[in-house]
Amino acid sequence: MSAHGFTSAFAQELDAYLEFKEKMGFYGSSRIWYLKRFDRYCLARARTVFDRDTVEGWVTEQLAASGRYCSWMSYIRDVGRWLQMHGDTEAYVLSERWKAPAVRAQPYLLSAQEIERFFTAAAQLHAHSPWRWQAVAFFTLMHSCGMRTGEVRLLTPDCVDLGEGHVDVLWSKGSRSRRLPLSGDVVKVLAACEQVSRKQFGMSRQRFFVSAAGNQVTAATVGQMFNRVWDQAGLARLAGGQQPRPYDFRHHFAYANVERWMAQGKDVTAMLPYLARYMGHATVDSSYYYIHTSPDFMTSYAHITDEAQSVLPEAGFE
């Protein structure tokens, strides 16, 4: 029986591939989700050879559903390379012609009023699932700690230390880990969520945030619940304009900190390494992408990207 529920002729190979990736530190559920779609495609069409027709047939069908090039193409391309390395020299590796340059989505700039109304609605969410009590805590970690959606989804109960007031983000993007201190208000929100979850699911749940079945929540579900809360709050959506997403809480965290430092008269250049470390960025340069969205940042501090003479303190937290 497949460890991941695969049922096609490639079930054994897909299980072995995922086991290999996990040993390399890659545990993302997105990879599994898309490979299950590929597995169902192959089963429905009795595909038994990992050739060009099979792979590109699935990619074409997937594109018709998604409407654009996405990072999921790298998953099936990687499977082909792995199969070749493990003896299947005829396995097809998805051509680079299917690869398109990555285009970063433009952030939706959340206002203070929108954030307040969002969390008011999240606290009164109409849902017959754990999201009824999890929504506020989940999105609070993104808003107040700048965590990535995937980082919040992967949190285990052991990584949330409410007594000491911190969360541990383990093996995140680029296999980097970090410890994030929490404010008293955030601790209270997480404690309320933990109390209900523990009562409903006991001490053995694998993730801090879970689905109705006790499993890890999916990225798609996070987006769906965000939209449900947004609409329940009666917040507007711009016709044809940039739509709000959960990730915009992370953007807001970055530029809100920069604006606060500017208001306090602090040297933003000197503070950026701390922001980069807290948000899990490999370099300070990665933080510029987030802070350039600040309405006031480009006007007041546009020159800092050209300055190299500042002495930056060591990035880290006590």
Image (tube, rainbow, N blue to C red):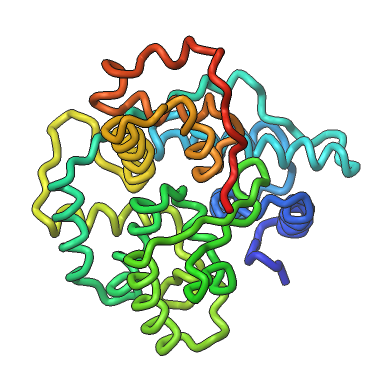
Q: Is residue 124 above or below residue 118?
A: below
In-image side of 224 versus 92 (left or right): left
**Whole-percent x, y for residue 121 in the image:** 16, 63
201 or 183, which is in the foreground? Answer: 183
Q: Quadrant of residue 33?
A: bottom right
Q: Quadrant of residue 280?
A: top right
Q: Is residue 18 above or below residue 277?
A: below
In-image side of 75 versus 132 (left or right): right
In-image side of 150 versus 20 (left or right): left
304 or 79, which is in the foreground? Answer: 304
Q: Is residue 279 visible?
A: yes
In-image side of 48 versus 289 (left or right): right
Where's the N terminus, which quadrant? bottom right
Q: Is residue 243 above or below residue 162?
A: above
**Whole-percent x, y for residue 172 in the image:** 60, 49
Q: Is residue 44 visible?
A: no
Find the residue positioned furthest to the right: 87
Residue displayed at 29% across by 33% down: 259
Residue displayed at 74% across by 32% down: 92
**Whole-percent x, y for residue 78 in the image:** 71, 38
Total number of numbered discs in the rendering: 0
Q: Quadrant of residue 141?
A: bottom left
Residue displayed at 34% across by 73% down: 188
Residue displayed at 32% across by 75% down: 129
118 or 23, which is in the foreground? Answer: 118
